[in-house]
């Protein structure tokens, strides 16, 4: 059994959901005397925890059904007095196109109520600002392919490939495809990289007030080797019975786990001299006060990517603390039918058009250069739009222009 992955939704034009469906995820329908009910107006695709045979296939459904006596009866969950919820084992989704659900038996009351559950309900909020990859491809085919169009003979699979590649490239520096995750640093000081990780944006520790403090990468201060072979007395790597190098534990990692931050930063501590310059130097720890390396003067800790283990490794003084990791994904990791902000729609069309045309022999070089320039300009415009700059916010920041920047 697996958890239901959170999937954003898109809203059709014109809108089909009413206010109750959008804000509450709720719809009440009259009994039709059968065991089949459809909810086609929901943007959310219904997912059931059980199949028609009653076999559990997921941990939980993303909706609940209630057997109501009247349209104004309050839905009550199982386990509560007067419960009218239908047991999840008696519900199965049989058609995801129009959200058809099958019940093991007809309802006793006169009305059936559906309630979309979190996180599916939250994933639907703001759906009008997004377009699905499928919509992008369909719109592109209508606008650019066919008789008397720019492309008169192109396969849908070709468009699909370039659309996915465009979304990947857009995700790196144009689309707001930054993921985030909160984790606790274990005793090993290593956290596995997120499943859809491409590159990190920011790693920060979380203090007791919930404020983020940016951690810095090692940048050569220490390191995590990709290989650590065992060696003989001559320094030659040793092999096992199958001729493969025997791996040992990197000493640099073990030593780094035991490192004391103050001995690296030179942070002033009158009760624990760091050895930078001792009290014998005018009894003021002179080197600590004036010899700090600003690149190492950091109390928020360090991290690095351990390529050998596929983890994010942290410095020793943050064991057991919580970290907040912002990272870039490519927009396709959890769902091939990715979603694109409408603000970047035109740029995506232009990029797909250029990438499709640049490999075709029936498109001349001048036209290819025009499409390349057009894609560049529209991508630049999309970046400006998606930066979401507001005049009042810029003015507020500029009020501090006379202040020195301090960290």
Image (spheres, rainbow, N blue to C red):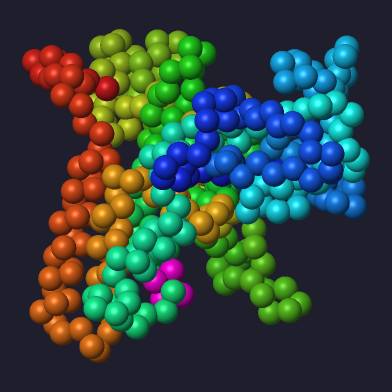
Report the residue at 43% width, 69% height from top: 160
Question: How many labels sit on residues?
Answer: 0
Residue 259 can be seen, yes or no: no
Closer to the camera in the image, 405 or 120: 120
Choose top left, top right, bottom left or bottom right for residue 133: bottom left
Instruction: Tell me: 404 left or right of 263.
Output: left
Closer to the camera in the image, 89 or 329: 89
Q: Position of residue 190 (x, y in %)?
A: 59, 41
Residue 264 can be seen, yes or no: yes
Instruction: Tell me: 367 left or right of 168.
Output: left
Quarter of the rendering occupied by the C terminus: top left
Q: Position of residue 31 (x, y in %)?
A: 79, 33
Up the image or down, 99 lies above or below 360; here it is above
Q: Is residue 158 rendered magenta in the image?
A: yes
Q: Is residue 271 rendered magenta in the image?
A: no
Q: Position of residue 88 (x, y in %)?
A: 83, 36
Choose top left, top right, bottom left or bottom right for residue 150: bottom left
Report the residue at 61% width, 45% height from top: 40
Overall secondary structure of the magenta section: helix
Up the image or down, 340 lies above or below 243; here it is above
Instruction: Tell me: 213 left or right of 57.
Output: left
Q: Which residues are magenta?
A: 157-161
Outermost residue, bottom side: 361
Q: Position of residue 233 (x, y in %)?
A: 61, 67
Closer to the camera in the image, 376 or 39: 39
Report the residue at 74% width, 39% height from top: 61
Report the residue at 67% width, 67% height from top: 246
């Amino acid at each position: 059994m697996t958890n239901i992955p959170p999937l954003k939704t898109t809203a059709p034009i014109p809108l089909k959901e009413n206010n109750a469906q959008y804000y509450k995820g709720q719809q009440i329908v009259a009994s039709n005397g059968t065991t089949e009910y459809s909810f086609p107006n929901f943007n959310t695709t219904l997912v059931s925890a059980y199949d028609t045979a009653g076999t559990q296939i997921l941990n939980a459904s993303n909706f609940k059904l209630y057997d109501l006596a009247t349209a104004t009866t309050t839905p009550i969950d199982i386990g509560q007095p007067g419960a009218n919820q239908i047991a999840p084992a008696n519900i199965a989704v049989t058609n995801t196109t129009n959200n058809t659900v099958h019940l093991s038996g007809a309802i006793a009351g006169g009305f059936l109520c559906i309630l979309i559950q979190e996180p599916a309900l939250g994933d639907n909020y703001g759906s009008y600002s997004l377009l699905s990859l499928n919509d992008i491809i369909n719109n592109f085919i209508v606008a650019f392919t066919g008789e008397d169009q720019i492309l008169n003979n192109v396969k849908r699979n070709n468009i699909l490939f370039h659309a996915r590649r465009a979304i990947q490239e857009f995700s790196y520096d144009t689309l707001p495809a930054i993921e985030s995750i909160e984790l606790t640093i274990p005793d090993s000081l290593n956290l596995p990289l997120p499943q859809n990780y491409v590159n990190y944006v920011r790693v920060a520790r979380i203090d007791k007030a919930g404020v983020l403090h940016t951690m810095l990468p090692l940048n050569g201060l220490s390191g995590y080797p990709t290989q650590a072979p065992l060696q003989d007395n001559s320094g030659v790597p040793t092999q096992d019975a199958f001729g493969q190098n025997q791996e040992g534990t990197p000493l640099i990692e073990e030593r780094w786990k035991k490192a004391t931050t103050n001995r690296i930063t030179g942070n002033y501590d009158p009760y624990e001299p760091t050895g930078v310059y001792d009290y014998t130097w005018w009894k003021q720890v002179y080197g600590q006060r004036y010899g700090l390396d600003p690149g190492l003067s950091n109390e928020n800790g360090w991290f690095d990517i351990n390529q050998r283990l596929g983890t994010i490794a942290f410095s020793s003084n943050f064991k057991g603390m919580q970290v907040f990791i912002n990272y870039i994904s490519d927009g396709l990791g959890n769902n091939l039918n990715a979603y694109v902000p409408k603000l970047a729609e035109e740029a995506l069309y232009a990029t797909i058009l250029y990438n499709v045309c640049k490999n075709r022999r029936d498109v001349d070089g001048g036209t290819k250069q025009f499409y390349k320039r057009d894609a560049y300009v529209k991508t630049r415009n999309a970046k400006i739009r998606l930066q979401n700059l507001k005049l009042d916010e810029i003015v507020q920041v500029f009020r501090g222009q006379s202040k020195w920047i301090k960290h």
